[in-house]
Amino acid sequence: MNYTLKSIPDRTQKPRVNGLTMVMDKGLSIRQIEDFLEVAGPHTDIVKLGWSTSYVTPNLENKLKIYRDAQIPVYFGGTLFEAFIIRNQFDDYRKILDKYDMKFAEVSDGSITIPHDEKCEYIRKLSDQVTVISEVGSKDAAKIFAPYKWISLMKAEIEAGSWKVIAEARESGNVGLYRDSGEVRQGLVDEILTQIPAETIIWEAPQKAQQVWFIKLIGSNINLGNIAPADVIPVETLRLGLRSDTFDHFLDMEAS
């Protein structure tokens, strides 16, 4: 940090496994990535190339190299996995991961229906090849899972080999964990946390109010996902109690 302040929450250090900031790259150019990393690289833990953007992104190999040279893992969005699965091209997907030397892969079923046993088998197979991050929850706002369902799905996917499970919200933050207004389904989160360790979950939280809510609930070292590149520094200040939304929260914790 640039100077010293007392009573700042302790943050885990990179490379970290808890307190992750997962950034959503929806089509940044090479120059934009370089500018982004200059400012936000120290606070970025992993980057997702959103949904299937890697299919149409120019200079993909150069883009991946820039992230890797900055020692920031990058992976393809889960929708790309689903696009291969729906076309019966799982083996082709595995070859693509090898071709681009991917170390992570996301397994999701937010856009298509995959029997859960089959999804877990994909996780098992891919976990022999890469580190798997799986996603629970639908991108369809009409599909609302009961808390026990979220818990059972997460447990099964962790057991199958997922390193982390993502709690779905889309890049808009108005499905899955959230109501269409963006409000957190608080009861759902509370139930999930009774049986799934917080450090195992990446909570998609693209909106500031959602980020604030989760930081206040779990603390500075919560895993947050779908963070926009321009929001990485603002999110880090929220984590450290250096923005008005969390300012008093951490001062009160220190005084207690």
Image: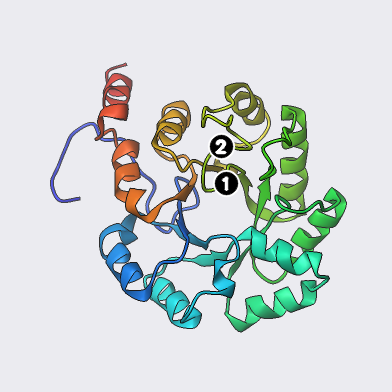
Characterize the local packing of mark 2: few (<14), some (14-19) or many (20 or more) Cα atoms within 10 angstroms: many
Characterize the local packing of mark 1: few (<14), some (14-19) or many (20 or more) Cα atoms within 10 angstroms: many
Where residue 171 sits in the image (x, y, percent)? 52, 48
Q: Is residue 26 left or right of residue 70?
A: right
Q: Residue furthest top?
A: 256
Q: Residue furthest left?
A: 3
* Quadrant hosting residue 112: bottom right
Disc 1 and disc 2 in contact, CB within 8 angstroms: yes
Q: Is residue 20 left or right of residue 37?
A: right
Is residue 246 placed above or below 107 in the rendered structure?
above
Between 92 and 122, the one nearer to me in the picture: 92
Residue drawn where x is 59% and y is 60% of the image: 51
Residue drawn where x is 66% and y is 25% of the image: 191
Q: Is residue 77 left or right of residue 36?
A: right
* Quadrant hosting residue 128: bottom right
Is residue 248 placed above or below 182 in the rendered structure?
above
Residue type at tag 1? Arg
Between 169 and 56, the one nearer to me in the picture: 56
Where residue 130 sits in the image (x, y, percent)? 65, 68
Label 1, label 2: how far apart the Cα atoms are: 7 Å
Q: On the image, numbered disc 1 is attached to which residue?
A: 170
Q: Split into 4 quadrants, where in the image is the C terminus?
A: top left
Residue drawn where x is 36% and y is 75% of the image: 30
Which scheme is used to colour this image of the protein? rainbow
Q: On the image, numbered disc 2 is attached to which residue?
A: 174
Element at label 2 = loop
Where residue 53 sits in the image (x, y, percent)? 55, 67
* Quadrant hosting residue 133: bottom right
Residue drawn where x is 33% and y is 53% of the image: 230
**Which label number is shown at residue 206?**
none
Residue type at tag 2? Asn
Where residue 177 sits in the image (x, y, percent)? 60, 34
